[in-house]
Image (tube, rainbow, N blue to C red):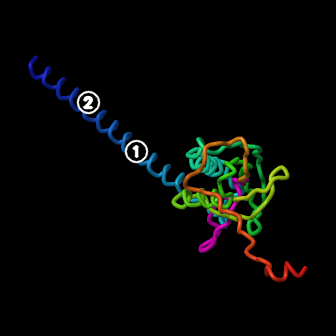
Amino acid sequence: MQDQHDSHQSNSGGVGIFILFIVILLLIAGAAGMFYGSLKQEKPKDLADTTVESFDLMEESKIAHRIVDDVLLAKRENWQLRDTERREHKDIQDTTGADIIWTDREVAVGVPVTTDLEGAARWVKEHLRDTDVKLIAEKESEWHDMDAYKLMLGIAVKSGKDSERKFLTDTIYFFHHGNLTNRDRDIPREPEPKDERKGDPEEEKQQ
């Protein structure tokens, strides 16, 4: 009887070890699958990849919007922000014919009349320097018939070995808002240049 009992315990122990071994193998396989899956997911997009029929840059666009918002909201006590328009864009990659989808938007930023418009844009650029948001262009502009300064920002996506393509995601218009009273101490408005041309007093008398 004792031998049968010992044999039963031995068999039970062997089955238990086998099951434990199978469980460990499954856990290892699952971890490996998650690891390689994450590697595949983290692989950067390359617009020159001919195996891809469509590039979805919607998430990259949203991340850019959030980064820009975080910078602008740091000035919420001084500036007035308005997200005026958001659109979905679709384009075709010239070399591969793949579809490319992303979003862009316009943001109107009212600043106090004491704030320099180009200085406000420069302040934003400085705070975006260490982010993935790229400067595409900037220039003097108009917003609703008011003088403005336009800052165009976007994302850069790899397109081949040594090149990239930029996509516009955020167009910011800085304009003077007369109802804003909190001054920007770090972005003063440059004084208007004075006309230093003075007439000769003797010539004025002769006239």
Density class for disc 2 (Cα within 10 Å; few <14, some 14-19, many ≥20) is few
Position above or below: 6 against 71: above
Between 206 and 1, the one lying in front of the other is: 206
Which is nearer the eye, 65 or 18? 65
Secondary structure of residue under mark 1: helix
Q: Is residue 35 left or right of residue 55?
A: left
User: How many numbered marks are there?
Assistant: 2
The x and y percentages for residue 171 are 72, 54
Q: Amino acid at mark 2?
A: Gly
Asked if disc 2 and disc 1 are in contact, CB closer than 8 Å, the reply is no
**Residue at x 16% of width, y 26% of height:** 7
Picture residue at 23% right of the left edge, 32% below the top: 14
Q: Which mark is residue 31?
A: 1
**At 75% from the left edge and 72% from the top edge, which residue is drawn?**
195
Question: What residue sits right under mark 2 in the picture?
Answer: 16
Residue 164 in view of the camera: yes
- In front of the other: 135 or 4: 135
Inter-mark Cα distance, 2 to 1: 23 Å
Q: Which span of residues is magenta-colored?
A: 153-173
Tag 2 secondary structure? helix
> Residue 29, position in %: x, y?
40, 45
Please identify the quarter of the rendering in which residue 53 is found.
Answer: bottom right
Q: Hey, which residue is sitting farthest right in the picture?
A: 207
